[in-house]
Image: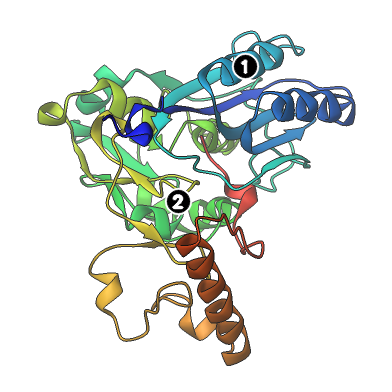
């Protein structure tokens, strides 16, 4: 007899964004949330005057209906979408939030609709970053870079995308020198942080700025593994944690205290405790917090043994850095 679970269709996961001009993002919020709930969609969508950003998951037809709804919004016909699949729902709940920015950089006057770097297709990216006159910068956060990156890329060691402008201004002369500036190629998970970071560099007077169209997700989907310059896996902001070439599931799990990625070697660290702490966050939490996490983890294990779903408390995350 067939296993019913094995015959269940995979869910669609849509990572999406669009820089657009929304006169009243609040008016968009409720109708968007209604259609998401009606279609059984979970995940996070961020709305701001500058556009929409997020990652959602659900049935194939439900995702298609929500994408049609978003594309009908002002200036969203050319919505940037990366589709992948998941065998289990990668989100616990649905959140449709209003924000000041759809990806937070905190720099006034940055508008990717007005000025942005040159898009580079996934198939052309290898040649660009292999050019010795090109500086390659990973615009993601340090915990993402630790999971994987392009060979030779500079890691700014930032904890938040908000830190990127200060890092660049501090390192500008070391990176670019005093003569003719080299080409600068930047990348991120799905493209949105690169749109803002290239717009920022253009505002700083850098002309030869390039970014990977569709981000790492598009590269891993389009470039065969044997031709790839990507090393290891790519962190994603959902319960899949990381993915590899062909957008296949990766090998990482999440620390439930801080939501940083945890690899097999990390679980061997003496400060790692499943559901409670990892080496990266142990010093950031108190004994009382760890006791609370420990009880939550116990309750989740009991629920799983009884076949129940136990979401638990809302975990600290980095919603402003949600990337697609």
Percent x, y of residue 243: 32, 41
Is residue 177 at all visible to an observer of this figure?
Answer: no
Horizontal side of 3 relative to 172 (left or right) equals left
Secondary-structure class at tag 1: helix
Q: Residues within 10 Å of mark 1 (few under 14, many from 20)?
A: some
Secondary-structure class at tag 2: helix
The disc at residue 13 is none
**Identity of the residue drawn at 56% across and 26% down:** 16
Outermost residue on the bottom side: it is 287
Percent x, y of residue 186: 40, 37
Q: Nearer the viewer, residue 170 or 149?
A: 149
Outermost residue on the left side: it is 226
- Residue tagged 1: 67
- Residue tagged 2: 172
Image quarter hosting the N terminus? top left
**Identity of the residue drawn at 29% across and 71% down:** 266
**In this view, 309 is above or below 280:** above
Q: Quadrant of residue 30?
A: top right
Q: Quadrant of residue 200?
A: top right
**In this view, 12 is above or below 238:** above
Percent x, y of residue 125: 27, 25
Percent x, y of residue 258: 52, 68
Q: Nearer the viewer, residue 151 or 323?
A: 323
Number of residue marks: 2
Q: Quadrant of residue 133?
A: top left
Horizontal side of 255 relative to 160 (left or right) equals left
Contact between marks 2 and 1 (CB within 8 A): the answer is: no
């Amino acid at each position: 007899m067939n296993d019913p679970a094995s015959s269940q269709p995979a869910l669609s996961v849509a990572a999406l964004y669009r820089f657009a001009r929304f006169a009243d993002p609040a008016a968009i919020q409720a109708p968007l949330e209604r259609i998401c709930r009606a279609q059984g969609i979970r995940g996070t969508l961020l709305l701001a005057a500058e556009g929409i950003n997020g990652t959602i998951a659900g049935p194939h037809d439900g995702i298609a209906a929500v994408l049609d709804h978003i594309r009908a919004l002002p200036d969203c016909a050319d919505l940037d979408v990366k589709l992948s699949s998941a065998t289990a729902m990668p989100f616990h709940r649905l959140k449709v939030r209003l924000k000041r920015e759809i990806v937070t950089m905190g720099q006034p006057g940055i508008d990717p609709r007005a000025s942005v770097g040159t898009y580079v297709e996934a198939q052309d990216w290898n040649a660009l970053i292999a050019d010795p006159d090109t500086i390659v910068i990973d615009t993601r956060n340090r915990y993402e870079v630790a999971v994987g990156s392009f060979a030779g890329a500079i890691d700014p060691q930032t904890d938040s995308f908000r830190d990127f402008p200060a890092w660049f201004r501090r390192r500008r002369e070391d990176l670019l020198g005093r003569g003719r500036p080299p080409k600068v190629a930047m990348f991120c998970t799905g493209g949105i942080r690169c749109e803002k970071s290239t717009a920022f560099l253009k505002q700083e007077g850098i002309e030869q700025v390039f970014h990977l169209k569709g981000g790492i997700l598009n590269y891993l989907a389009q470039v065969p593994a044997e031709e790839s310059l990507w090393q290891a896996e790519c962190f994603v902001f959902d319960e899949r944690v990381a993915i590899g070439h062909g957008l296949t599931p990766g090998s990482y799990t999440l620390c439930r205290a801080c939501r940083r990625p945890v690899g097999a070697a990390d679980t061997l660290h003496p400060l790692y405790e499943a559901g409670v702490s990892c080496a990266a966050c142990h010093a950031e939490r108190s004994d009382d917090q760890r006791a609370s996490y420990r009880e939550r983890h116990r309750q989740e294990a009991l629920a799983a043994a009884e076949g129940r779903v136990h979401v638990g408390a809302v975990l600290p995350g980095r919603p402003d850095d949600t990337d697609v």
